[in-house]
Image (spheres, rainbow, N blue to C red):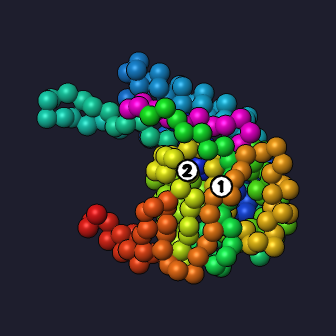
Amino acid sequence: MTWSVMDEAIRNAVAVGADPDRIAVLDNFCWGDPLRPETMGSLVEACRGCHDAALFYGTPFISGKDSLNNEYLGADGLRHAIPPTLLISAIGIIHDVNQAITMDLKEAGNAVYLVGSYQLPVISDQSVPDVPKETPQVYRALHQAITSGLIRSAHDLSEGGLAVTAAEMCIGGRLGMNVVPTLVGMFTEVNGCLLVEVSPSNAVAFESHFVNLPFQKIGVVTSNPILKLGEQEIPVEDLVHAFNSPSHL
């Protein structure tokens, strides 16, 4: 869990143009009563995860806080702790604000790439996706492509997986996207992956940054405002309505 939280925070910063070698993080622990052995045990392991992930990414912790003893009295008359919750905030440096990247699709005809190792976890009630070992190198390669002016838009895969990421990019740009039907686990959450939009004229230069790193071209931006996921077609207008009216889902 901790590694996933760390990766998502760093991935969000990289997606907008932050230098992955100049990112720092803050932690915010919300836990139950640490005097309970099982609660303290999970807190210690989460701290261990923060330590290990910080070394893996080279991201120092510069501050943080904790909120302990988050418990309530249940209808059964017993005390219950909230689910252990960890918030990681990432702060980075963008050397030129004009190179900052947004997630909205920009132009029909542009290619859409999936960067990162799209490793689907074995699904179970306790499954948490791993962080692929090459993830820091993927983030550095993406940053080099951004600073070279090769990226039109980028968005990290997080809640809702690839399908929701694509939908949000379509909503932002009011453009469509055709995604190849060969991908599986469209709604599966993974670590270390992003969708990026690249113009055809920059495709070769973009791909040169990812030699020996995982990436694949998965689709194209379309002027027809429809998100096509294999055989499934969803008008962007419907996506916008669902985004603005979640109570109707």
In the rendered image, residue 150, in percent from the top left (x then y), is placed at: 79, 68
Tell me the SS state at disc 1.
strand
Q: Residue at x 81, y 73 (%)?
A: 201
Task: Please name the predominant secondary structure of the magenta segment in the image.
Answer: loop
Amino acid under disc 2: Leu
- Residue 196 vs 201, above or below: the answer is above
Task: State yes or no: discs 1 and 2 in contact (Cβ < 8 Å).
Answer: yes
Q: Residue at x 49, y 61 (%)?
A: 229
The image quarter containing residue 101 is: bottom right
Q: Is residue 60 visible?
A: no
Q: Indicate which label's residue lies in the foreground, 1 or 2.
A: 2
Q: Residue at x 49, y 69 (%)?
A: 227
Q: Residues within 10 Å of mark 1 (few under 14, many from 20)?
A: many
Q: Which residue is mark 1?
A: 114
Observer-nearest of 163 and 80: 163
In the rendered image, residue 208, in percent from the top left (x then y), is placed at: 85, 56
Q: Residue at x 62, y 63 (%)?
A: 219
Q: Residues within 10 Å of mark 2 (few under 14, many from 20)?
A: few
Observer-nearest of 102 and 165: 165
Q: Is residue 16 visible?
A: yes
In the rendered image, residue 113, in percent from the top left (x then y), is placed at: 67, 59
Q: Which residue is mark 2?
A: 183
Magenta highlight on residue 177 = no
Residues under labels 1 and 2: Cα distance?
11 Å
Observer-nearest of 132 and 39: 132
Which of marks 2 and 1 precedes in the sequence?
1
Magenta highlight on residue 134 = yes
In the rendered image, residue 248, in percent from the top left (x then y), is placed at: 26, 67
Considering the image in quadrants, where does the C terminus appear? bottom left
Magenta-drawn segment: 124-135
The image quarter containing residue 102 is: bottom right
